[in-house]
């Protein structure tokens, strides 16, 4: 099925560990985004990318890194996990040529840092 | 700059009664506006969108929203709530600012509870 696939769905990390959240889409969308969702806070943009090789910071980028080597993949890297990074992470993509900027979301990755 | 305010963090209605979820926005440029729904442990799904065409927008599952520029509002309504409508709803504003990619701003969400 076409869409945005995120892995893993759940992960528990210890403080200081590192990990990568994977995101891939098969819709040939140029724009991809990483959001985090905290209770009562809506979604906050971490990083986004407008195409392969191009990334930019969003509202809350500290503690994260991204890369975009292909159109399909947009992994999010946590280098030194901290309890403040406990959250649900959503990857999303869109086709800017569609004009409406409708996002397609992945199912989310729930991360707990202890 | 742009922002979104969802005026109610929780709304509770009885099944079969109308639903009203309120959203106000601000934007320096002509915005597009969206409502997304999130069921428990799921990703967000588009309900409807406004992109400068008709101001009354119809979406999926009987939801609709009206864009009112004078009131800077985009409230979501449904005539008759169903148990399956229980979820969290997000209002989103999107606009271009010169020199940068289109930016989206999410409201903080409204949790809709439907009582039997």
Image (cartoon, coloured by chain):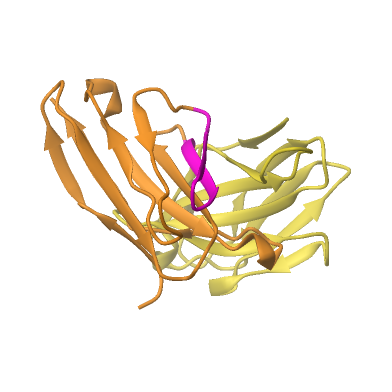
Chain colours: A orange, B yellow
The spot of residue B1 in percent (x, y) is 73, 30
Q: Is residue A38 among the parts visible in the rendering?
A: no
Instruction: Check if residue A44 falls in the magenta segment.
Output: yes
**Above or below, A63 relative to B53:** above
The spot of residue B68 in percent (x, y) is 82, 50
- Residue at far right of view: B70
**As drawn, is A39 to the left or to the right of A71?**
left
Residue drawn 44% across the image and 28% down it:
A61
Nearer to the camera, B58 or B3: B3
* Quadrant assignment for the N terminus of chain A: bottom left
**Above or below, B68 relative to B83:** above
Residue stretch rendered in magenta on the structure:
A42-59
Nearer to the camera, A47 or A101: A47
The spot of residue A8 in percent (x, y) is 20, 52
Secondary structure mostly seen in magenta is strand
Residue B84: name its quadrant: bottom left
* Quadrant assignment for the C terminus of chain A: top left
**Above or below, A5 relative to A76:** below
Q: How many marks?
A: 0
Residue B52: name its quadrant: bottom right
The spot of residue B42 in percent (x, y) is 33, 57
**As drawn, is B59 to the left or to the right of A89?**
right
Instruction: Check if residue A43 falls in the magenta segment.
Output: yes
Q: Is residue A71 among the parts visible in the rendering?
A: yes
Residue drawn 60% across the image and 67% down it:
B63
Residue drawn 52% across the image and 63% down it:
A29
Nearer to the camera, B30 or B90: B30
**Above or below, A77 relative to A107:** above
Residue B107: name its quadrant: top right
């Amino acid at each position: 099925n076409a869409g945005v696939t995120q892995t893993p769905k759940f992960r528990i990390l210890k403080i200081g560990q590192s990990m990568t959240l994977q995101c891939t889409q098969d819709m040939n969308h140029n724009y991809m985004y990483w959001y985090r969702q905290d209770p009562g806070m809506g979604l906050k943009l971490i990083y986004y990318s407008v195409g392969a090789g191009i990334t930019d910071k969003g509202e809350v980028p500290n503690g994260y890194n991204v890369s975009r080597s292909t159109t399909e993949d947009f992994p999010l890297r946590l280098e030194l996990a901290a309890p403040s990074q406990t959250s649900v992470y959503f990857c999303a993509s869109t086709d800017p040529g569609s004009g409406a900027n409708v996002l397609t979301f992945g199912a989310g990755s729930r991360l707990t840092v202890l | 700059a742009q922002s979104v305010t969802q005026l109610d963090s929780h709304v509770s209605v009885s099944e079969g009664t109308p639903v009203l979820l309120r959203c106000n926005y601000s934007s320096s440029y002509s915005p597009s506006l969206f409502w997304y729904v999130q069921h428990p442990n799921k990703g967000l799904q588009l309900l409807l969108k406004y992109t400068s065409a008709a101001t009354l927008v119809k979406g999926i599952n009987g939801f609709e929203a009206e864009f009112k520029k004078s009131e800077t509002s985009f409230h979501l309504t449904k005539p008759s709530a169903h148990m399956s409508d229980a979820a969290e709803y997000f209002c989103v504003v999107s606009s271009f600012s010169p020199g940068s990619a289109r930016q989206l701003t999410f409201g903080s969400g409204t949790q809709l509870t439907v009582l039997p």
